[in-house]
Amino acid sequence: MEVFEAILKRRSVRKFTDKKVTDEQIDKLLNAAMAAPSACNKRPWHFYVVKNEEVLSQLKKASRFSNKNSSLIIVACGDTKRALPMQLNDYWIQDVSAAVENILLTATGLGLGTCWCGLHPMVRTVKKVRAILGAPEHHIPMALIHVGYPDEFPEARTQFEEKRVKIID
């Protein structure tokens, strides 16, 4: 699949089949994530891959947006110990977002569906997810990504709006 095709086909999937994502597919998703650009190559990310039914159940209840029926969740966190210092600290958000998008596009290319559920900056939800994962304080849960085989197939689309573009020659 061409990259542009994957970009247009990537849509949020909220219904999944029971078919499990393979370890090989998970490895590809994580390799894609960690190929993302990051400010000063700090790579301030940490990923929790959750297959355990009990933990999945808890994560699905962590926020009102995260209750989907996927058999796999990847929680993408910012690792503040690897982030840039002082006023540049928040660049981890951009870095982790780029990694998440790489996961979403790679999943699309593999025939998988995904749904990115935002966590940060919802303080209570971040604390809940961190507790469920047993994550240290310096791991900030930013995104909960449902991954699985889709049981719904939203149409590919673009949301291009020419009026939102200003070309300066």
Image (cartoon, helix red, strand yellow):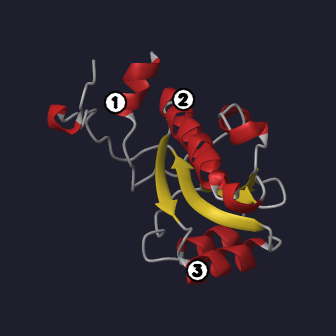
Q: Secondary structure at mark 1?
A: helix
Q: Residue 38: image x %, image y %?
A: 68, 39
Q: Residue 138: image x %, image y %?
A: 80, 68
- The image quadrant where one finds the C terminus is top left
Q: Compare residues 15 and 156 and report the one nearer the observer.
A: 156
Q: Compare residues 138 and 109 and report the one nearer the observer.
A: 138
Discs 3, 1 touching: Cβ within 8 Å = no
Q: Which residue is mark 3?
A: 123
Q: Secondary structure at mark 3?
A: helix
Q: Which residue is mark 2?
A: 110
Q: Is residue 88 above or below residue 113?
A: below
Q: Compare residues 57 and 74 and report the one nearer the observer.
A: 74
Side of 142 relative to 108 (left or right): right
Q: Amino acid at mark 1?
A: Leu
Is residue 51 shown to the viewer in this render? no
* C-alpha separation, residue under disc 2 versus residue under disc 3: 33 Å
Q: Earlier in the sequence, mark 2 or mark 3?
A: 2
Crowding at mark 2 (Cα within 10 Å: few <14, some 14-19, many 20+): some
Q: Which residue is mark 1?
A: 8
Q: Residue 62: image x %, image y %?
A: 56, 77
Q: Nearer the viewer, mark 3 or mark 1?
A: 3
* C-alpha separation, residue under disc 3 versus residue under disc 1: 32 Å
Image point (58%, 41%), residue name: 98
Side of 17 relative to 160 (left or right): right
Q: Nearer the viewer, mark 2 or mark 3?
A: 3
Image point (65%, 34%), residue name: 36
Q: Is residue 161 above or below residue 126?
A: above
* C-alpha separation, residue under disc 1 versus residue under disc 2: 14 Å
Q: Nearer the viewer, mark 1 or mark 2?
A: 1
